[in-house]
Amino acid sequence: MVVNDWVHFIAGAFILISLGLGILINPNWFWFTAFVGANLLQFGFSKVCPLAMILKKLGVPESRQCK
């Protein structure tokens, strides 16, 4: 998987987990859902993604290798 795939996977997982925690544990978890949504929104305008920068530093490839 490449950086873009990981960003979508992690953002989706965080949203689903925080929604579940908000329903089952405490509604304050919805703030985490809002935080993830706000990061996705700001990426749409600025094209800057902190998670993608972290993943790149960890060595996740930016594009698929053609064989």
Image (spheres, helix red, strand yellow):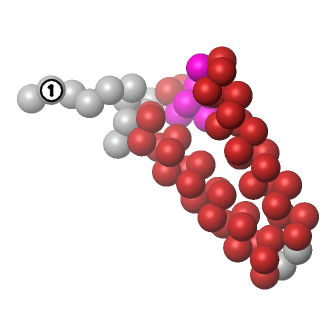
Q: Quadrant of residue 67?
A: top left
Q: In this rendering, is residue 25 above or below 44? A: below
Q: Quadrant of the N terminus?
A: top left
Q: Which residues are magenta?
A: 47-55
Residue closer to the observer: 9 or 56: 9
Q: Quadrant of residue 48?
A: top right
Residue at the bottom extreme of this rendering = 24
Residue 46 x/y as whole percent: 66, 18
Q: In this rendering, is residue 11 above or below 45? A: below
Does residue 20 show up? yes
Residue 37 x/y as whole percent: 71, 44
Q: Say which amino acid is labelled 1.
A: Cys
State yes or no: residue 17 in magenta. no
Q: Taken as a whole, is the magenta stretch helix, strand or loop?
A: helix
Residue visible at 70% across and 73% down? 20
Q: Quadrant of residue 18?
A: bottom right
Please give the residue where the numbered disc 1 appears in the rendered image: 66
Residue visible at 78% across and 45% down? 35
User: Residue 4 vs residue 41: left or right?
Assistant: left
Residue at the top extreme of this rendering = 46
User: Residue 47 vs residue 37: left or right?
Assistant: left
Residue 12 x/y as whole percent: 56, 54
User: Residue 23 vs residue 67: left or right?
Assistant: right
Does residue 54 show up? no
Q: In this rendering, is residue 50 above or below 21? A: above
Residue closer to the observer: 1 or 13: 13
Residue visible at 55% across and 30% down? 52
- SS class of the residue under badge 1? loop
State yes or no: residue 54 in magenta. yes
Residue at the left extreme of this rendering = 67
Q: In this rendering, is residue 39 above or below 25? A: above
